[in-house]
């Protein structure tokens, strides 16, 4: 029942660029002696009472089975003591390098959708260089990034975001994968369902229980069955199995939000520390909003605990504002709804403002009683 699926669009040219072990690569670039070690970006559990989570690991560490979000204590058990090295994350440095990489992306096109500091989609169907070949553009970008930052990246090129993402993951590190329209279904048929972006572990387990292990198995399933079994997610799985993904690359060039967040090692267990952090965030956001002449209408808090569970809560402000006190008061109320995360330890705390609008007037102070 493929007639239930939307008509495919194979005319676009999409690049998915993904930096290779980004945080670890930046650290190895700045300290080449770390390259021979199993490098883990995260708190050394021997110095943090056994606490800590792996932010990322280099490819040497991955050979021992270390991966992102793993407790650092487990990583310590997997790697020989003389081979392992820990480096605390330096997100200010990573953001600065990410900004350099994004500058190079915008030399090709303004249609750039940033997914993370180290990952982005680019729609180069129409591009600033007038180059027809997306592969040529992606290769130039990969080479420029290496020349400017000393870091390697991998890319996937195809006619939609889903396939481009699969391509960038297919041949890491320093990989280049092109999936043409006429090759897409055969390529997908050969992939394990674990390689399909968006199919999480629980869905994988359910599919395995039904004898579904590969893209070919998915392609042979009735679309109606997938929809009935997995609802909306099943419809997207059916589309992806046939190489269909109509989502646009959403340009993030226009500022839609202003925010700040930080990862804490050791984690936060004290409410006063959390609120003090939110007060500083509020002052920082207020300053940035005023500098850009913005008023915010919505506030969003983001919290992640030591088990890597993440929750976001948002609240509409009573009126658009850029006042630090008003922002903090709303932030405090939002935090009350997630303060149970303190018992597990807050690993990440973030605050952002969205629904921005331009301030149409300037606040000035007038002394009505001054006379000449």
Image (spheres, rainbow, N blue to C red):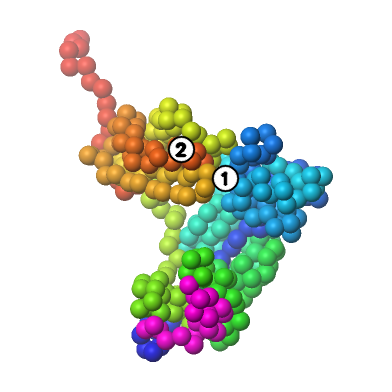
Q: Position of residue 309 (x, y in %)?
A: 47, 50
In the rendered image, is residue 181 in sight? no
Left or right placement of residue 148 versus residue 235 in this view: right
As drawn, the label of residue 161 is none
Residue at the top extreme of this rendering: 372
Residue drawn at x 47%, y 45% is 304
Q: Is residue 235 left or right of residue 48?
A: left
- Which residues make up the magenta segment? 206-225
Label 2 crowd (10 A; few <14 / some 14-19 / many >=20): few
Q: Position of residue 324 (x, y in %)?
A: 34, 30
**Cα distance between the residues tagged 2 and 1:** 30 Å
User: Looking at the rendered structure, which numbered label has been put on residue 95?
Assistant: 1
Residue at mark 2: 343
At 44% from the left and 56% from the top, the residue drawn is 252
User: Which secondary structure type mostly characterizes the magenta part of the structure?
Assistant: helix
Q: Is mark 1 on a helix, strand or loop?
A: helix
| Image location (x, y in percent) of residue 119 | 56, 58
In this view, the residue in front, 162 or 366, is 162
Q: Nearer the viewer, residue 120 or 238?
A: 238
Quadrant, the N terminus: bottom left
Q: Residue furthest front?
A: 209
Query: Quadrant of residue 49 in the image?
Result: top right
**Image height of 237 relative to 202, above or below:** below
Q: Counting residues from the N terminus, which is met first, the one under dot 2 or under dot 1?
A: 1
């Amino acid at each position: 029942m493929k007639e239930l699926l939307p008509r495919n669009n194979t005319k676009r040219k999409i690049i998915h660029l993904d930096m290779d072990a980004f945080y670890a690569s930046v650290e190895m670039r700045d300290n080449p002696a770390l390259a021979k070690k199993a490098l883990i970006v995260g708190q050394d559990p021997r110095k943090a009472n056994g606490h800590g989570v792996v932010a990322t690991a280099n490819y040497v560490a991955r050979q021992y089975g270390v991966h992102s979000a793993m407790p650092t204590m487990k990583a310590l058990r997997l790697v020989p003591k003389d081979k392992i090295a820990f480096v605390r994350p330096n997100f200010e440095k990573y953001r600065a390098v990410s900004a350099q990489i994004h500058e190079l992306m915008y030399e090709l096109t303004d249609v750039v959708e940033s997914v993370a500091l180290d990952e982005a989609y680019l729609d180069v169907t129409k591009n600033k260089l007038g180059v027809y070949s997306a592969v040529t553009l992606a290769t130039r970008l990969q080479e420029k990034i290496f020349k400017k930052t000393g870091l390697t990246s991998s890319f996937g090129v195809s006619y939609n975001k889903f396939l481009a993402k699969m391509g960038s993951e297919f041949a890491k590190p320093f990989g280049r994968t092109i999936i043409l329209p006429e090759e897409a279904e055969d390529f997908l048929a050969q992939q394990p369902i674990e390689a399909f972006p968006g199919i999480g572990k629980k869905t994988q387990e359910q599919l395995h229980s039904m004898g579904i292990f590969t893209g070919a198995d998915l392609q042979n399933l009735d679309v109606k069955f997938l929809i009935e079994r997995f609802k909306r997610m099943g419809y997207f799985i059916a589309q992806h199995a046939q190489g269909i993904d109509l989502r646009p690359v959403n340009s993030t060039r226009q500022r839609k939000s202003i925010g700040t967040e930080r990862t804490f090692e050791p984690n936060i267990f004290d409410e006063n520390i959390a609120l003090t952090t939110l007060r500083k965030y509020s002052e920082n956001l207020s300053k940035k909003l005023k500098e850009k002449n913005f008023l915010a209408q919505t506030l969003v808090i983001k919290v992640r605990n030591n088990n890597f569970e993440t929750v976001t809560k948002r609240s509409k402000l009573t009126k658009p504002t850029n006042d630090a006190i008003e922002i903090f008061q709303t932030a405090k109320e939002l935090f009350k709804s997630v303060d149970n995360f303190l018992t597990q330890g807050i690993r990440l705390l973030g605050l952002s403002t969205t629904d921005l609008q331009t301030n149409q007037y300037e606040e000035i102070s007038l002394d009505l009683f001054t006379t000449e």
